[in-house]
Amino acid sequence: MLTRRKFVQLTGVAGGGLVIGIGLLESCEQQKKPPKNPLPNTQNGFGDNNGSAIGEYLQIRPDGQVFINIVKHEMGQGIASGLMAIVAEELDADWDRVHVVYSDPIPGLANWAGGSTSTLNEWGIMRSAGALARKLLIQAAAKGWAVDKEDCFTDNNHVHLKDSENKVEYGELVDKIVFDPSESEVTELKDKKQFKLVGKVFSNKIIPDIVLGKHPYALDIRLPEMKYAAIERAPVFGGRLVDFEATEALQLPGVEQVVPIKGFVLDGSSHIRDGVAVIANSTWTAFQARKKLKITWEAGEKSNIVHERFLEEAHQRLREEDGYVAYSKGDVDTYPDAEKTISHTYEFPYQHHACMEPLNATAIFMEDRCEVWTGTQAANYMLGNIEKHLGVPKENIKLHCHPSGGGFGLRYWASHGMEALLVSKAAGGQLVKMVYSREDDIQFDFLNPLEINTHTMGFKEGDPVTWQLKGALDNWGGLCAWMIYDVPNVHAELIGLKGFTQMSAWRSVMANAEGFSTECFIDEVAVELGEDPLEFRLGLLPEGTEVQLNHKYPCKIDRIRKALKTVAQKGNWGRPMEEGSGQGIAVYPYMHGNGYAAAIAEVSIESGQVKVDKIFVAIECGLVINPDFVKKQMEGGVIWALSALFYGGTEYDKGKVTRSNFHDNKVLRIHETPEIEVYVCESDEEQPWGVGEIAPPVTYPAVCNAIFAATGKRIRKLPISTV
Amino acid sequence: MKVNINGQDYEQELDPDMPVLWVLRDVLGLTATKYGCGIGQCGACTVLVDGQAMRSCTTKVRFVEDKQVQTIEGVSREFLHPVQKAWIDEQVPQCGYCQSGQIMSAIALLNENPEPTDGEIKSFMSGNICRCGTYPRIIKAIRKAAQND
Ligand code: FES
Ligand code: FES
C-alpha cells in the first residue's frame, strides 16, 4: 500500500515543481519505493514511406516494425487493434512490433464505420493482407537460402528454415520482397485452431497513447498559421440568416474576421445551417466573440412545431393510417376470429449523441484544392460531398482521418468537415480549426429519431397466431422489424413523421426503440398468459430454425437461444428477490451486424426512484477476435442505454433545442453505474459478427421488465423518471 | 504573465480572464487536457493545481499565477505513473477522450486518500463523465493503483 507521502513524492518526481519539496523532506521514507514502471511504447499513427508497402494495407520496415493501415474509423470501439490483430495473426507478426496507421481514404474501399460491421467486413480482407505478406516473406527468404518455399515456416516476425537453426527477421527481408499485384491472390489461410492471437485477450494498442495524453484527436491538431473558428448557427432547423452586426465582436482583442455562412442541404440525410463564423486567435476568444454578435434570423416553419401536438398527431396517425409495409410473413388477416388480442404502444424518444469530443474539423480551402483534418465515420462520403458541393475534384482533396473521441453515428455526416471548409473559403482561404462548443453539440445535434411502436398479438386456442408491429418514425431510417418469435403470421408497417429537426444514426439505431418495444411487449404477453417470461420466449424460439428478416443474413435461432440460456443461467433467472426488487429479462438480435444479446437486469425501488443494481449480459457474436474488447463494448453499450433510459429525450421551444450542456442533457455517471457482468458465448460460427451496438437494445427492456417485476407497473415510454 | 506548468515557467502575454484550459491548449500547445463542456460539468479538463484537482475550463489563468499546474503531460516524464499503469493493466480507455481528466482526478483522489473505499472512489470521480461507459474499469483501476506499491 502506498503511503500518502510516497504517493505525493512519486507524483512530484514525475511532474517536478512544488511536490518535489515534500518528497525531499521525507526522503527517509523512500526505501520502499513504488515500482518504476517503464514508459510504454506509443503509436505513431501516421505513416511515412521508408518501408516496403504490400498492397493497400500494410508496410514492413527494415527494423521489422509492421505498420497497418486502418481504413475503419477508430472512435473507441477498438477497431484499430482488432483489425491489426487479424493481420498480425496471418502474418505471424510480433504483436509488440505492430503499429496503427490511421489511413487516409483509399478510393474504392468502403471505409464507413457503422452498423457494427467493421470487423465482419474487414475480416476476410485483413486476413488476406496478412497472409499475402507472409507468403511474400517466405518467398524472399527461400530465395535467399536457395531452398524450396515449402521448407520454410514463419513464427514471431521471423521466417525459419525447417530442421535448422536458420532464421531471418522480417525486417531484413523487406528489400528482397518482390510484390506483383497481379499475383495478390491468397491461397493459404490459417485454420482457426492455429490462431495464437485472435481469440485471446491482448492489449489495445492505442491505450498507452491515451493514458500519456498523446492520442491524435482532430481537436488537438496544431498547424502553423492556423486560426480558431466558432459558428453561431441558425437556432431552428431550416431557419435563415437575415442580417448580422459584428462591430462589437470585432473589437475583442484576438478576433480577426467575422463571416457569414450560407447553409444548404447536403443530401437526404444531412444539412448545413446558415450561420455567422468568428475567426480568432483562440477557441475561447472565438466563443466569447460569438456572444457579441447581433443576428437577425428568420426562424422558418419548424419553429411552429409544438411537441405535445406533434406527438398527439403521431399517435393518431399510428391508429388510423395505413403505412408502408416493412416486413410480412403469412397473412395476419386470416384470423379475423382471434379469440384474444393483446396490444400495447411504446414510445422511444429523441436522443442526443453527446460524444465527449465535440465535432470539429481543421480545414483550408484553396479554390481548386483543399485539405481537411477531422474524425469521420465515412471518409469517402465526406470526399464525395466536398466534390459535389464545393466543386473541388476528389483527387485535389486531402482528407486526414483522425481517431475520434466517440462517434456513435454522429460522425457519419459530412457537415463538420464541410463547415470548416466553408469558413475557410469565406475567410479568403484562412486555415481554421472549427470547433463546436458543447452547447452547439447539443443544440445542433442530428438526433436519434423518435419512434412509436404498437405491437398487437392475436391468439387462437391459447397460441399466438398473428403478430403485428406498426411503427411511426421521425424522418430517418426505416423500421427494422426484427420479429424473431415463431408466430405464423407476422406483419410490420411504417408511418413516416416529420419532426422539428434533422435525425441521424445513433448507436444501435432503430434497434433501440424496437428492442425496447418488442421485448417489453413479449414480457407483457407472457405475464398476461400466466407464463414465465424466459420459458415463454424459449417456447417461441424453436431449436434448429432460422428466420429470414429481409436481411443479408438469416437470424439463427440457436444462437439467440444460446445467448438467452447463458444469461438465464449466469444471471440466476427466477431467483427469489426481496420486496421492492425485481428481475427482468430480454433478448434481441442486431441484424445489421448479426450479433445477438440477452440481458437480465436487477432493480430495486426506493421511494419511487429506480436503482439498477446489476446487469448480466450475454452475447453471441460469432468468432471472437478479443473477448476483452467484446466485454468493453458490452459494458459501454449497457451504460449507453442506461443514460437514455433515465436521462434521454430532448425538449424544444419554437423549434430550438432547450437542452444545452451536461447539466441538462445528463448522462450516466460513475456513482449511478450498476455492476455489469458480461458473458461472451462460445460460437461455432466461422467468422466474427457485430459487437458495438448489440447491448443497448436488450438493456432497456430488461430494466423495464425488472421494474414491472418489482412494482407491477409497466414502463411504455422513456425516459423513466419515477415509478 | 508567468505561469508554471509541469515544473516549467512560461512567460506569456495573456488575458488574465482566459481559462487555464485554453491557455494550455491554444496558447501553449499542451493539448492533452481536453475540452468537454466548458462549464465544470464533465471533468475532461481536470488538472492539478498545487496537487488539487481543478476544472481548468472554469479556472481563470490569473488564479494560477503563483501556483504549480500539473497536466497529464507532466505526470510521467521518465516513468509511468502507477495510476497510468493501472489504467493500462485494466484496459480502461475506449475512445480515451475523457481519460486525461479521469486520470488526473484519480491521482488527486489518491493523493488525498491513498486507500479509498468504493463509495469514496465513486463520489470523488462522479464529476468526470465518460460517454463510452468505462466506469466499471475506472473503479477497478483505482483500486489497483491504490494497492500497488
Ligand atoms: S471541460 Fe471542464 S469540466 Fe468539462
Ligand atoms: S473513454 Fe470515451 S468518453 Fe471516456
Image (tube, rainbow, N blue to C red):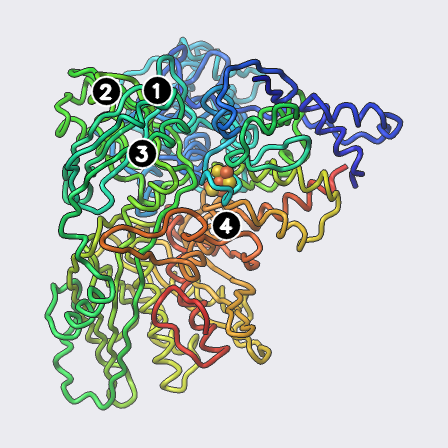
Q: Which quadrant, please, contains the N terminus of chain B?
A: top right
Res. A107 in view = no
Residue A321: name its quadrant. Answer: bottom left
Q: Residues within 10 Å of mark 3 (few under 14, many from 20)?
A: many
Q: Residues within 10 Å of mark 2 (few under 14, many from 20)?
A: many
In front: label 1 or label 4:
1
Would you say the residues marked 3 and 4 are in contact, meaning their CB atoms lie under 8 Å apart? no
Mark 3 and mark 1 lie on one chain; the one further toward the N terminus is 1
Mark 2 belongs to which subunit? A
Residue A451 locus on image (x, y percent): 26, 62
State which tag comes first along the sequence, 1 or 4. Answer: 1
First-in-chain label (3 vs 4): 3
**In this view, B7 is above or below A641:** above
Q: State which quadrant residue A180 falls in.
A: top left
Which residue lies at the image location 16% right of the left edge and 16% below the top edge?
A: A367
Q: Are marks 2 and 3 in contact (CB under 8 Å)?
A: no
Q: Which residue is mark 1?
A: A227
Going from N to C along the chain, the mark reached first, 2 or 3, is 3
Against A154, residue A649 (above or below) is: below
> Can you identify the residue that label 4 sits on?
A631
Question: Are callouts 3 and 1 both on one chain?
Answer: yes
Residue at mark 2 to residue at mark 4: CA–CA distance: 47 Å
Horizontally, residue A376 falls left or right of residue A264, namely: right
Mark 2 vs 4, N-terminal side: 2
Give residue B102's position: percent from left, percent from top.
57, 40
The disc labelled 4 sits on which kind of residue? Lys
Judge: label 3 CB < 8 Å from ligand 2.
no
- Name the residue: 31% across, 29% down: A186
Q: Which residue is mark 3?
A: A376
- Mark 3 or mark 1, whichever is nearer to me: 1
Q: CA distance from mark 2 to mark 1?
A: 11 Å
Do dots 2 and 3 share one subunit?
A: yes
